Image (cartoon, grey):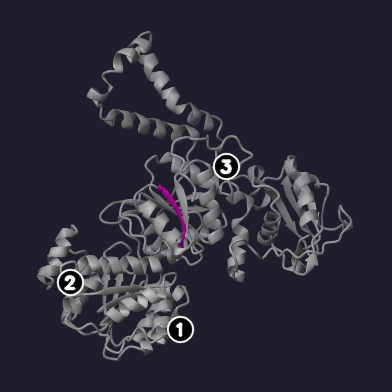
Amino acid sequence: MSTFLELGLKEPINKALTDLGYEKPTVIQEKAIPQIITSTDDLKAFAQTGTGKTAAFSLPILELADDTKKNTQAIILSPTRELAVQIGNNIKEFAKYMPNIKVVTVYGGANIEEQIRGLKRGAQIVVGTPGRTVDLINRRALKLGNIEWLVLDEADEMLNMGFKDELDKVLDATPETKQTLLFSATFPREVEAIARNYMTKPVEITSGQKNTGSDDVSHEYYLVTERTRYQALKRIADLNPNIYAIIFCRTRRETQEVADNLIKDGYNADALHGELSQAQRDSVMGKFRKKTVQILVATDVAARGLDVNSLTHVINHKLPDQIENYTHRSGRTGRAGKTGISIALVSNKEKGRIGSIERIIKKKFVQGKVPGGKEICQNQLMHLIDKVNAIEVKQSEIEDFLPSIYEKLEGLSREELIQKFVSLEFNSFLSYYENARDLNDLSSKETGRNGRGSNENMTRFFINIGRKDSLNPARLIGLINDQKITDNIEIGAIDILDTFSFFEIDKKFEEQTLNSFSENQPEFSGRGVNIEITKKERGGGRRRGGKKPFGNRDGGGFGRRRSSEKSSGGRRSENNNKNRSSSRRGGDRPDRNSNNDRKPSGFGRKRRERR
């Protein structure tokens, strides 16, 4: 393998790389750097996440840029503000000993006037998100007439996020003589279309095989129901005392709910999604990098640009809507020569997607068993003993206290002392998992239809809307949750019929359910919503006919509009609404009516202050 000096980089760049701890170039760097330095051909480069793509395109640009001119010579487009900031900071570090090189990063959510002032002072390299870049072009603050290099980083994600129009506008503002450099972790058909439309006979280089996963990442999946998904997540975290992980969710609402539930259960967790302000996002990411936050729950887009090399796990709370995104998710672990584990929690309905992902990443998944209480307790106990073994004893600081301690403990044998020490630290954990049930039992008796329980502890309700009102289980669950009956509601079996439906609620909240619907007076698809208690059918089967119940507990009068399509997070698209509703199913929340999987207060991890 070559050194960076042998790749043709000048001494100031090599000195900065040495300061940063860079010793040898990665495969993609070894291939891309000399290609860009020695040729003006367009370049299409495939590189897995975490293989050093930023250095692969930025180092040769630094080598070739004319630092005697202040005009913008390179524009680097990134799909997210986090990734743009990371790239900009990386380039500044690489240019540490090149004082005349200026880098400006532009992105939404930050003061545009300050960014304009930075551009006016002169910057050879501009890093930006597509939207803000186009905005600055329209304001004539960013002039790209002298651009020599255009870099499209994470091109697949820019297309997924709908930035095609912005890319077209940026391309129109750049000269035809520029060199276009396209970097991507996956190469779906849409990215190939970018290459055809925006590039001229591009040279192609790869690091590994296209669209495959890293060899440093192992892939596992666990079968769960909607009811046990969160419990399984907690057990996987407890099985790994040193876990440092990102949990990926599909929607903002799901992300926040999972993070909130983990925090309530005593984990050092936080959420990262698009509804956070830039200051909040920076704060969360800073804590995660410092490991103050041990588990980060994130959406796919928000996690782009999060450069952390020591993640132990990536956990897919649910598989991504576009299975190609699994490559991006799993690539966040197993970086910088370290190994990692990518875990997927899947229901029986989702299991078929595992095979599709295997064909894309060219790696096999191993089916794991959701750990039981005994296995978890053993791992945690051994972790505790290892910590005791490794602790440094500061004799000089404790010697004044030792005589009193020895006196108090003199009646205990060695065995009794060890037993009491372990019990002091471990009783709550042992109690927590003492009667923990087997989450690998996915029998219908356990979960009922739709993944939720159907038993005598549930009350069955009639509701006067059905399929003809565009009702489905996800939207019904969203409607129920919007009534804010209680934080701990468990929703059971659901039956959607043509003009009316049935659902089950934990019997303990029977009265609250009736009162909440009566007081809120919700509407759905323009109809006033009416519920009442009805008898369960024998065997819990679907009601096929019979007389439709009518009337409302308090005599009607549903005047105030309350749309189930709204959420506290603001506007959502129809697709996002569907995802939001399904993410609020009872199974995605902690099973707070079960003592077996309830996290004991203060156990294990320091409870962090919520933002």
Q: Identify the image quadrant of residue 68.
A: bottom left
Question: Which quarter of the rendered picture does the N terminus lie within?
Answer: bottom left
Of the numbered discs 2 and 3, the one sitting upstream in the chain is: 2
**What residue lies at 45% left-to-right and 28% top-to-bottom?**
426
Which dot marks residue 99?
2
**What residue lies at 49% left-to-right and 46% top-to-bottom?**
233
Which dot marks residue 503?
none
Q: Nearer the viewer, mark 3 or mark 1?
A: 1
578 falls in the magenta region: no
User: How would you rate the neighbour count of disc 3 (Cα within 10 Å): few for under 14, some for 14-19, many for 20 or more?
Assistant: some
- The amino acid marked with disc number 3 is Asp
Which residues are the magenta region?
A: 293-300
Q: How far across and how far down the image is residue 544, in percent?
A: 81, 57
Secondary structure character of the magenta stretch overall: strand
Badge 3 marks a residue whose secondary structure is loop
Measured in 3D between alpha carbons, the distance from the residue under mark 1 to the one under mark 2, in whole angstroms, is 36 Å
Q: How far across and how far down the image is residue 109, in percent?
A: 44, 69
Q: Nearer the viewer, residue 568 or 524?
A: 568
The single residue placed furthest to the bottom in the displayed view is 176
- The amino acid marked with disc number 1 is Asp
- The amino acid marked with disc number 2 is Pro
Q: Identify the image quadrant of residue 559.
A: bottom right
Q: How far across and how far down the image is residue 177, in percent?
A: 26, 90
